[in-house]
Image (spheres, rainbow, N blue to C red):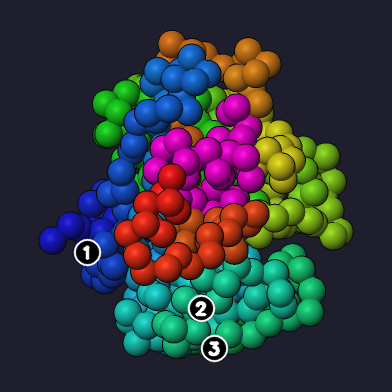
């Protein structure tokens, strides 16, 4: 049995011997070497950390395993979150695993079909609000002080702690620290978590730390603009966030690493999303392609270190957003059930 992140990394996490080792098998995701995108821009050491292969299909499971374990240890009966989709899918999965209730609050019409289906299927109480993710988060934070309720958004420090384990895995898999890491940024929790993971390794092992490059969508880029965005817009629903909860720590990761947080357009995101599927065999949801879109933009500018290992974090699985996968594509009309018709159709 593959140990989960609590078991594997207990020594580096805020757990005691009595914290339950809750797991759905999260973590231990593949680091896949790029076969075509990297070489096409002169990068021969480009890797993808494929976090879509976590149990509920996103990196959120790392933080959720730990947040759920700590909630159970504290006697909580309900996991509560606001979500652009993946936090709700993950919280619902871990709640069902542990016999807890999940209450998830999502922006009406603002989450991908697969994620909504997951929360419902795992048995969560799914509430939609007429407003943005930011509104939903503000509301749930105000009802989170009820007894027996654990708030499992990334404002919960256990989420960030669990998510930092992805940085540990990358260094184990590469057997060195990448020189640059590209990652999509919504609430800023994950870039904070990776930076913490790399920084802890630097302290304990004297290793280097990567430059952190965060990608926001052009219509939802508060960290790039330096002020909140009231009506965030982007096809990448997972990062459609106007007022990031981990604002300061995301900026700190950028500045301490000598990296950047930059905006990419929806067109660039969708182009990278398509290239990952067609040139690498990697299905991701649109938000996950934002880091790759930023890498491609920086490679065009010539600001990428070509001779060093570079990692792009692919945060969520493509099947979560089937509509995005098939946009502009059609299945050809059905053929007659004859050899001649099939041969003609194959061409
Ligand atoms: C949550 C999420 C992000 C953004 O992560 P933050 O911690 O909010 O910055 C990016 N991609 C996917 C698929 C996500 O689910």
Residue 315: image location, x then y, percent: 49, 50
Q: Residues within 10 Å of mark 3 (few under 14, many from 20)?
A: some
Q: Earlier in the sequence, mark 1 or mark 3?
A: 1
Q: For the C terminus, which image quadrant?
A: top left
Q: For the N terminus, which image quadrant?
A: bottom left
In the rendered image, the residue lying farthest to the left is 1
Q: Residue at x 68, y 38 (%)?
A: 268
Residue 193: image location, x then y, percent: 49, 46
Task: Classify 33 as above or below 113.
Answer: above
- Judged by its main secondary structure, the magenta piece is helix
In the rendered image, the residue lying farthest to the front is 340
Q: Which residues are magenta?
A: 270-296
Q: Residues within 10 Å of mark 2 (few under 14, many from 20)?
A: some
- 54 displayed left or right of 104: left
Q: CA distance from mark 1 to mark 3?
A: 32 Å
- 89 displayed left or right of 129: left
Residue 151, image quadrant:
bottom right
Q: Earlier in the sequence, mark 2 or mark 1?
A: 1
> Does the magenta run of residues contain 88?
no
Say the numbered circle drawn on residue 125.
3
Say the numbered circle drawn on residue 17.
1
Q: CA distance from mark 2 to mark 3?
A: 12 Å
Q: Residue at x 63, y 78 (%)?
A: 105
The residue mark sitting in front, 2 or 3, is: 2
The residue mark sitting in front, 2 or 1, is: 2
Task: Classify 223 as above or below 95.
Answer: above
Residue 103 seen in render: yes
Question: Label 2: which residue?
Answer: 117
The residue mark sitting in front, 1 or 3, is: 3
């Amino acid at each position: 049995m593959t140990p989960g992140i609590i078991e594997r990394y207990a020594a580096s996490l805020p757990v005691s011997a009595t914290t339950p080792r809750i797991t759905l098998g999260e973590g231990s995701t593949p680091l896949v070497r790029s076969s075509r995108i990297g070489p096409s821009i002169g990068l021969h050491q480009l890797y993808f950390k494929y976090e879509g292969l976590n149990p509920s299909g996103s990196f959120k499971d790392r933080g959720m395993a730990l947040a759920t374990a700590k909630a159970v240890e504290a006697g909580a009966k309900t996991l509560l979150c606001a979500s652009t989709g993946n936090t709700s899918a993950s919280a619902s999965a871990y709640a069902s695993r542990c016999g807890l209730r999940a209450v998830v609050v999502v922006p009406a019409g603002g989450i991908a079909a697969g994620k909504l289906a997951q929360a419902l299927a795992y048995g969560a109480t799914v509430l939609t609000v007429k407003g943005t993710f930011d509104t939903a988060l503000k509301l749930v934070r105000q009802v989170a002080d009820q007894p027996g309720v654990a708030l499992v958004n990334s404002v919960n420090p256990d989420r960030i702690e669990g998510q930092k384990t992805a940085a540990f895995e990358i260094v184990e898999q590469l057997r060195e620290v990448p020189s640059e890491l590209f990652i999509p940024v919504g609430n800023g929790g994950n870039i904070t978590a990776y930076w913490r993971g790399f920084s802890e390794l630097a302290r304990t092992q004297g290793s280097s730390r990567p430059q952190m490059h965060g990608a926001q969508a052009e219509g939802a880029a508060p960290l790039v603009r330096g002020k909140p965005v009231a009506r965030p817009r982007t096809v990448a629903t997972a990062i459609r966030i106007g007022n990031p909860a981990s604002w300061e720590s995301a900026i700190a990761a950028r500045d301490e690493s000598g990296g950047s947080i930059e905006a990419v357009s929806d067109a660039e995101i969708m182009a990278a999303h398509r290239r990952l599927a067609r040139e690498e065999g990697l299905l991701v949801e649109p938000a996950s392609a934002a880091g790759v879109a930023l890498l491609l933009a920086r490679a065009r500018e010539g600001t990428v270190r070509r001779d060093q290992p570079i990692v792009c974090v692919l945060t969520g699985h493509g099947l979560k957003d089937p509509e995005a996968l098939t946009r502009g594509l059609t299945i050809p009309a059905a053929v007659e059930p004859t050899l001649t018709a099939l041969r003609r159709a194959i061409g």
